[in-house]
Image (cartoon, rainbow, N blue to C red):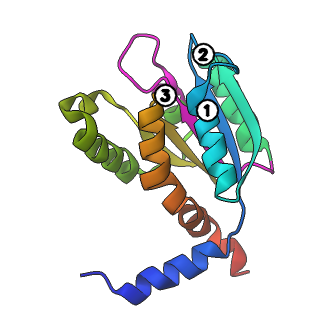
Amino acid sequence: MPNESSFQDHATESSSVGSLGFAVITLSDTRTDATDMSGKFIKNALTEAGHKVPYYRVLKEDRVKIKSTLQDCLADPEVAIVITNGGTGIASRDSTIEVLASVLDKQLDGFGELFRMLSYQEIGPAAMMSRALAGIAKNRVLFAIPGSTNAVRLAMEKLILPQAGHVYWELNKHLRAK
């Protein structure tokens, strides 16, 4: 059984991170700024949790545009965490995971595993078609989640918001020790 004080230590350490800057990118051939309910949900959840969203875009499923946008986010000093939604399925146009994987330095396998487990509890075996992914690139945290509002809600409430500060703190704690 995990030691409760170790949970408290991590919570205290990661809460010292404070407000983080997020990039939110919706990847869809059909959504626009006006119709992007999932992106709006993510932005609202982040700001309600005290974070900033200095970067928001709705992009078509285009590998070159996705990679260029990710590189812009990774170079932006205001962005600590990137969340993409959409493009994680198995359709021929779904290319988010391939592009995201190409920029990652490290993959956080547990994120996708946990997302699919939680998703299975809600939608059953169709959860296997989600290729949700997370990882680290250029000292930033990246999350790729499905674009449905229910999937976004699940990922934000159960995984991303509860752990974003801790993941960012773990990634950067060596910088604080200097």
Say what secondary structure mark 1 lies in: helix
Quick one: label 3 or label 2, which is nearer the N terminus? 2
Residue 59: x %, y % from top left: 65, 19
Residue located at (70% from left, 56% from top): 51
Residue located at (70% from left, 34% from top): 71
Q: Residues under labels 1 and 2: Cα distance?
A: 10 Å
Q: Mark 2 and mark 3 in contact (Cβ < 8 Å)?
A: yes
Amino acid type, callout 3: Gly
* Residue at which label 1 appears: 39
Q: Residues under labels 1 and 3: Cα distance?
A: 8 Å
Say what secondary structure mark 2 lies in: loop
Quarter containing the N terminus: bottom left
Q: Is the residue 144 above or below the residue 177 in the image?
A: above
Residue 72: x %, y % from top left: 75, 34
Bounds of the magenta segment? 77-99
- On residue 31, the disc is 2
Quarter-of-image position of residue 166? bottom right
Residue closest to the eye, 104 or 52: 52
Residue located at (38% from left, 13% from top): 91
Q: Mark 2 and mark 1 in contact (Cβ < 8 Å)?
A: yes
Amino acid type, callout 2: Arg
Residue 31 vs residue 147: left or right? right
Quarter-of-image position of residue 43? top right
Quick one: label 1 or label 2, which is nearer the N terminus? 2
Residue closest to the eye, 85 or 110: 85
Q: Residues under labels 3 and 2: Cα distance?
A: 10 Å
* Residue 83 counted in the magenta span: yes
Quarter containing the C terminus: bottom right
- On residue 147, the disc is 3
Number of callouts: 3
